Structure formats: structure tokens, C-alpha cells
């Protein structure tokens, strides 16, 4: 039986119940642990709160003996990461079950295998919060922190959740060198978020595409990567080689930066 994910809230974080509170709490979080704590109790999107909790109650038969997390999923990885990988949202029976982003679902299988091959994760798999996995100089986060029905958040939900993304990017900004968008949804969500987090983004948005690369300020680069969703991997739209191409590029950019400060490791959310 996998361990339940660590809870950083310790019952001290107020729960946001609307967009204004998300903005206020995200702006007030002065550290990634504080941001994680505030994110993980958020209840600002009624539809997503109802869905994540319903899935956690009903559970999939294969996981009937497990306790689902059933809450928003904070970012995971070192606080001084050079690479941020941004996905769409947690999977209902993946992150929403394990409490760790991209952990316990098929997309995560592809993602962690690619991260491992690129030297950005210690293990090629990510099964549960206590599996010993460590991210190397890399932080994983989602544009929307709660599992949405059919993996489709509304634009209102995306925008309500944006301050958490902005706050996390702003806290990572001193060391961040690569922002890798997994899929068009994350790409679209990132442009305004990066600007609000203090990055100089080009006035004209580039269209999303696989291996699209956009220079931001101070040598930071934004990379596009097709999402390793089941549909994309089943149909061959995304292959391991394609992921290696983008994650290898991200690792090379991180390595050129790491030469001056050493790698950063984390197994904690
Ligand atoms: S999606 Fe984001 S803003 Fe909405 S309830 Fe979840 S954490 Fe809060």
C-alpha cells in the first residue's frame, strides 16, 4: 500500500474560496512551502472541488484500498530548480490519487522515463509519494492544480488558478533557465503567467509547437513539447525520441547554468 502524500498545510493555511482570495494568498506566499500549503487547501473552483472529491470518494476499482489525496496538487521539485515543466492539470486517478504531480498515471510513465533519460530525475518511474523518486534541478507543476472532468478545465478555472502558477514562477525566477510547456494548454496559460511573474516575454506570442523555443530575458528559454497523453502516445504523435529531443535540450540548458552552482535535488513536494 503506497504512503499517503505529505501534507504541508499542518492545518494553518486559510482556504481560498474565490478568485480574489487565490490572488491575495498567492501574492502573500513568500516561499514555495508557504505557496504549496496555500495551494493544497484551495477551494476556489466549485466544479473542480466537487469533481476531485467525488473521484476520491468513489475511486477506481484497482485503487479501492487506497486513500486518494482528492485536493489540489502543489508543485514538486527543488526550490532552486533551473527547469520548470508545466503540465495541464492532475489526472483524476493519478495526481489526484497520489498527491504528487504526474505520479501514478500513464502520462507520468512517459514523462518520468524521459526526465530520467535526460538526467533530470533519479528514477525512470513515478508510482507513489514514497517511491524514492527525486527530481534533479527540475520542478514539475500544473497550470490548473485540481483534476478536471475529462481533463478539460474551463477558461475561468484556468484563470482563477493562474495566481498559483504566477507565484510559483516568481519564486523560482532567480534560478530558472528553462520553462517547458507540455501541450498547448500549458503553453497558452504560461504566457500571461510568465509576464506577471516578472519575466520579459515577447509582445507577440509564438504559436505552440513541438520543439518551439522562445528566448525570454536573462537567457531563460521557453520550450514547447507535445503532451505525452495516452492519445498522443498511442497514436505515435509523441514518441520517446521526440521527448528526448526536448528534454535533452532542457537538460543541456540547465547544465550550462549548473556549471556555476551545482545540481539541486529534491524528493519532497
Ligand atoms: S483549480 Fe486552482 S484555483 Fe481552482 S480550486 Fe483548484 S487550486 Fe484552487
Image (cartoon, helix red, strand yellow):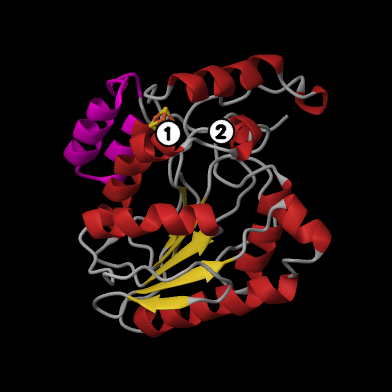
User: Which circle, 2 or 1, is nearer the viewer?
Assistant: 1
Q: Quadrant of residue 261?
A: bottom left
Q: Is residue 260 above or below residue 120?
A: below
The structure residue drawn at horizontal position 73% and vertical position 70%, both measured from the top left corner, is 240
Residue positioned 17% across, 37% down in the render: 28
Q: In the rendered view of the protein, which quadrant contains the N terminus? A: top right
Of the four image quadrants, the one with ligand 1 is top left
Q: Residue at x 20, y 60 (%)?
A: 198
Q: Secondary structure at mark 1?
A: helix
Ligand 1 within 8 Å, label 2 CB:
no
Range covered by the magenta-colored residues: 10-38
| Magenta span contains residue 36 | yes
Residue 144 visible? yes
Can you tell which mark lies on residue 157? 1
Q: Which mark is residue 147?
A: 2
Corner quadrant of residue 13: top left
* Left or right of 43, for residue 51: right
The answer to whether one can see residue 3 in this image is: no
* Picture quadrant where residue 66 is located: top right
Query: Real-space Cα distance between discs 2 and 1?
Result: 11 Å
Q: Is mark 1 within 8 Å of ligand 1?
A: yes
Report x, y in % for residue 131.
64, 46
Q: Characterize the local packing of mark 2: few (<14), some (14-19) or many (20 or more) Cα atoms within 10 angstroms.
A: many
Image x and y of residue 31, in percent:
24, 45
Residue 175 among magenta residues: no
- Residue 23 as seen in the image, left or right of residue 126: left
Q: Is 90 left or right of 55, judged from the image as shown?
A: left
Residue 45: horizontal and vertical position, in percent? 42, 24
**On screen, 255 above or below 129?**
below
User: Residue 11, position in %: x, y?
Assistant: 34, 18
Residue at 41 percent of width and 71 percent of height: 206
Amino acid at each position: 500500500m503506497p504512503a499517503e502524500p505529505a501534507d504541508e498545510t499542518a492545518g494553518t493555511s486559510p482556504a481560498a474560496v474565490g478568485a480574489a482570495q487565490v490572488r491575495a494568498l498567492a501574492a502573500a506566499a513568500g516561499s514555495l512551502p508557504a505557496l504549496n500549503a496555500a495551494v493544497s487547501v484551495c477551494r476556489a473552483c466549485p466544479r473542480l472541488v466537487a469533481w476531485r472529491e467525488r473521484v476520491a470518494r468513489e475511486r477506481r476499482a484497482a485503487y479501492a484500498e487506497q486513500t486518494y489525496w482528492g485536493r489540489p496538487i502543489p508543485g514538486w521539485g527543488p526550490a532552486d530548480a533551473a527547469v520548470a515543466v508545466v503540465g495541464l492539470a492532475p489526472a483524476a486517478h493519478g495526481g489526484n490519487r497520489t498527491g504528487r504531480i504526474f505520479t501514478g498515471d500513464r502520462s507520468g510513465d512517459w514523462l518520468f522515463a524521459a526526465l530520467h533519460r535526460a538526467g533530470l530525475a533519479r528514477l525512470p518511474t513515478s508510482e507513489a509519494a514514497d517511491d524514492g523518486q527525486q527530481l534533479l534541478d527540475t520542478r514539475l507543476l500544473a497550470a490548473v492544480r485540481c483534476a478536471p472532468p475529462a481533463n478539460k478545465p474551463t477558461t475561468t478555472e484556468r484563470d482563477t488558478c493562474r495566481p498559483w502558477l504566477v507565484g510559483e514562477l516568481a519564486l523560482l525566477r532567480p534560478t530558472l533557465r528553462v520553462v517547458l510547456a507540455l501541450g498547448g494548454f500549458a503553453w497558452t496559460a504560461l504566457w500571461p503567467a510568465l509576464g506577471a511573474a516578472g519575466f520579459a516575454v515577447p509582445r507577440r506570442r509564438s504559436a505552440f509547437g513541438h520543439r518551439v523555443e522562445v528566448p525570454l530575458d536573462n537567457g531563460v528559454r521557453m520550450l514547447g513539447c507535445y503532451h505525452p497523453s495516452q492519445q498522443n502516445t498511442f497514436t505515435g504523435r509523441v514518441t520517446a525520441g521526440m521527448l528526448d529531443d526536448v528534454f535533452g535540450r532542457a537538460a543541456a540548458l540547465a547544465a550550462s547554468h549548473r556549471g556555476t552552482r551545482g545540481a539541486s535535488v529534491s524528493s519532497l513536494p
